[in-house]
Image (cartoon, rainbow, N blue to C red):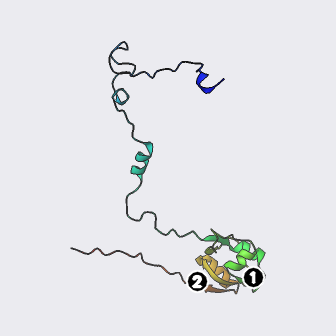
């Protein structure tokens, strides 16, 4: 057997060309009115509608989002630290009281839940007012972290 002797098993089916009059009738298998029944019916891609819904404001993605401070209570400091120990974010991380956020050292805020009897030296942490009072009552020291508030830079538009 050679290539020129091969014949197809099934006959090829011709594609119906509808909408040109003839035996199919008035609507020619396309249904009644609507976009599908018209010639050249093209649908708008779905992605185009999704793109149009996105915000068009300048720089909507680039706002800096500051991560919330990790909360540590006085009661947990009482359990895990000895008298006159230094408490800072690094020592809290070493004792596994806090975790890193996205690979960075988190801001730590100490709250006044629980009792404190030990004199602790606190550095580089934010404190609530009652937590600070409780630490000073227990004869501990507090070195406050200076919080820098940056004003957002505004672009000045030049008048033509």
In the picture, residue 18 is in which quadrant?
A: top left
Residue 31 location (% of width, % of height): 38, 21
At 52% from the left edge and 21% from the top edge, which residue is drawn? Answer: 12
Q: Quadrant of residue 29?
A: top left
Using the numbered discs, state the Cα–Cα distance from disc 1 to disc 2 in whole angstroms. Answer: 21 Å
Residue 133 vertical placement versus 20 (above, below): below
Quarter in which the C terminus is drawn = bottom left
Q: Compared to 34, does 139 lie above or below?
A: below
First-in-chain label (1 vs 2): 1
Locate the N terminus by quadrant. top right
Determine which of the numbered discs, if any, sits on residue 145 in the image: 2
Residue identifier under label 1: 118
In this orientation, which residue lies closer to the viewer: 60 or 36?
36
> What residue sits 60% from the left and 22% below the top?
5
The residue at the point 41 percent across, 47 percent down is 48
On the question of residue 115 being in view, the answer is no
């Amino acid at each position: 057997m050679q290539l020129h002797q091969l014949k197809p098993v099934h006959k090829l089916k011709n594609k119906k060309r509808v909408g040109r009059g003839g035996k199919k009738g008035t609507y020619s298998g396309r249904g009644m009115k609507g976009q599908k029944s018209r010639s050249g019916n093209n649908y708008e891609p779905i992605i185009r509608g999704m793109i149009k819904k996105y915000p068009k404001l300048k720089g909507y993605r680039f706002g800096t989002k500051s991560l919330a401070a990790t909360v540590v209570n006085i009661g947990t400091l009482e359990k895990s630290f000895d008298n006159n120990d230094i408490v800072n974010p690094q020592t809290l991380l070493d004792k596994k009281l806090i975790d890193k956020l996205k690979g960075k050292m988190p801001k730590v805020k100490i709250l006044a839940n629980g009792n404190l009897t030990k004199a602790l030296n606190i550095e580089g942490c934010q404190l609530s007012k009652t937590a600070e009072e409780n630490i000073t009552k227990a004869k501990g020291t507090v070195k406050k972290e200076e919080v820098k508030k940056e004003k957002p830079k505004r672009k000045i538009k030049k008048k033509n």
